[in-house]
Image (cartoon, helix red, strand yellow):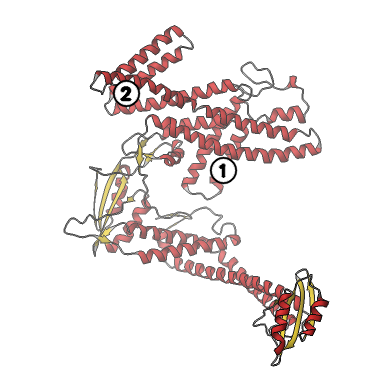
Amino acid sequence: MSVSKMKKLAVFAHNSELDVIVKKLMRLRCVDISTHSDDGDGEIKLGKIECDLRRLELESSVEDIDTALMALAPYVQKGDGMLAGKKRLDVEAFANDGRADEARAAVKRTIEIVKRREQIKAELAKASVDVSAVRPYLSYDLPLDVSGTESTECFLGVLPAAADLDAIGKELYRAGAIAHLIGNDKNGIYAAYFCHRSDSAAVSALLSSYGFLKASFTGVHTTAKEYIKNVQKLVRSLGEEDKKLQGELVALAARTGEIEVLYDVEATELEATRQKQKLAATDSVALISAWIPAGREAAVCAVLDKFECAYDTSEPEGDDVPPILLKNNGFATNFEWVLGMYSYPQYGRFDPTFIMSIFYFIIFGIMFADVGYGLLVTLACFIAPKVIKLSPGLKRSLKMFGYCGISCIFFGVLFGSYFGDMPIAIMKTMMGIPESELPNLSLLPAESANLALLLDPLQDPMSFLVFSLAVGAVHLIAGMAVKFVILCKDGQVWDAIFDIGAYWVLFAGLGLLFVAPDIGKWVAIAGAVFIVLTHGRDAKNIVMKLFKGLLGLYDLINYASDLLSYSRILALGLSAGIIAQVVNLLGTMMGPTVAGFIMMVAVFLIGHTLNLAINLLGTFVHASRLQYIEFFGKFYEDGGTPFEPALSSEKYTEHQE
């Protein structure tokens, strides 16, 4: 509805109270602290508050708490924390009465357990690999790391599976080596070759020529059998240790609620530290510069009055650029994030969120008009925030889609779409109802079975196109009306009449051509003359006045182009309906048989889910585009910076004094 009026806040606070003051202001959720930049003027040089080390410590702490909560999540019982609602308590008392220290100890132990379990997992994986490598040598009786004696050399390894052992054995025998076959599998033939050290070079070269790969078991001082027994013993020991650690996690999970509170304590401390880094300070005093909504001035002053500090509030002046805080009703607030994806309005200018939300609601519903899909979207988006912990921003986004789902249901009734033509398809194919007995609910003449009260876009796409363009015309004229009002409020009444009103006269004439051609012709001519005579009023030369006036008529092409953009309503509406119709056709093609009913359910679930996902995304994108380009282009003055107050963390808790 509007952009909130902002006030500047300046606070001089002693450094000993700074931390408490910043946290109190954060809890108000209405103070946008500015980053101080010292221009170097003045006798007093203000520096920065050094708290980088503290910030790093808190970042590490918050990360550890988050890791601990994720590790404990699988073991949390209902009511222990994550599955419960937000806890209301005095967070400051929790931080100072010892409970926070106990929670930190639980986090520390959880992190230790997580790291140890990761080590155990790595050790078990290594043991599995080691056993796989050693297993082929189970029948080998020597320690695996034995490479020979003082006078002999041992070559332990594997030959290719296709190797000719007889030929290799004869060659090696002539070279002075004897073979000991160990076994074979799909990976190769395992063997040990022994020779005098004086023949080792020749034997090694010969083995290499046959593709022999020497095994390396450095540090394995036992036979393969003994080694595997030792590894299995280690695996059992590691498994028992992991089971004990898992039991500890189950016990620690009972303290998840305290750890969640600790998360908010540390996250709030981290945010306070980041905010303090924005401030300027001397050795004893800090300056807090911030923006606050004018409506919250009393609440901010009430907090500051409790401290020994000096503060002042003032109106924006000069080159000040206040941040933008939108103020809308409960319905339009949910659409503010759509506006934020484009750009916020300039301070003191018009906030289009309310008007945009109405048109977005309507256009979204027309594009994705279907009772079934709309009902699913509405239920999912209104129920999800009640059963799942979500951020306020995500809750508003889901509520927006929930409202848009209601619009889809409304227009779905008008256009007769219930998961496309599912009722008709089921009645015709699965129930065998003749065409002549199918329902016809249309308020307008219709030749075949029809559930549409107003029109069926698939049966009458031209009427739907006209309907879409009519909605677009209203949308464009509404944008021009907003511009008209803005100009009048700025004292530019004649500009509003000449730049907006003249086109309305022309549009009225063009519209009347279809119902009263004689009247419409003269109204259109009057509008055109009005534009030519007034559009170049700023030019000093009469020739330029006339030239600019004629150029004003050229804007008709731009308006026509904008109007044609609304044909995308037709495209989106038809795409969703046609895909749904194809899904219904495929789902009922086997007829009223057992297999047919099974296929129908499977095809309907998969097909309509995909259609819902694809067209929900497409509708969101194109409904947004029509607001950003066609609607905002008529009046919107963007470029504002969003109001971003410093906030205490309330992910798991609500502070209670």
Of residues 580 and 261, the one nearer the viewer is: 580
**Marks 1 & 2, CB-CB < 8 Å contact:** no
Q: Secondary structure at mark 1?
A: helix
Rate crowding at label 2 as few (under 14), some (14 to 19) or many (20 or more) other CA atoms within 10 Å.
many
Q: CA distance from mark 1 to mark 2?
A: 46 Å
Residue 615 is left or right of residue 151, and the answer is left
Would you say residue 244 is visible in this rendering? no
Q: Quadrant of the N terminus?
A: top left
Residue 84 is left or right of residue 557, and the answer is right
Picture residue at 65% right of the left edge, 82% below the top: 218
Of residues 151 and 59, the one nearer the viewer is: 151
In the displayed structure, 396 sits above or below 354; it is below
Q: Position of residue 397 (x, y in %)?
A: 49, 42
In the displayed structure, 378 sits above or below 507; it is below
Q: Position of residue 182 (x, y in %)?
A: 79, 79
**Residue under numbered circle 1:** 383
Q: Secondary structure at mark 2?
A: helix
In the displayed structure, 475 sits above or below 209; it is above
Q: Residue furthest left?
A: 43
Picture residue at 46% right of the left edge, 62% below the top: 62
What is the three-letter code of the residue carrying label 1?
Ile
Front of the two marks 1 and 2: 2
**Residue under numbered circle 2:** 496
Of residues 129 and 386, the one nearer the viewer is: 129
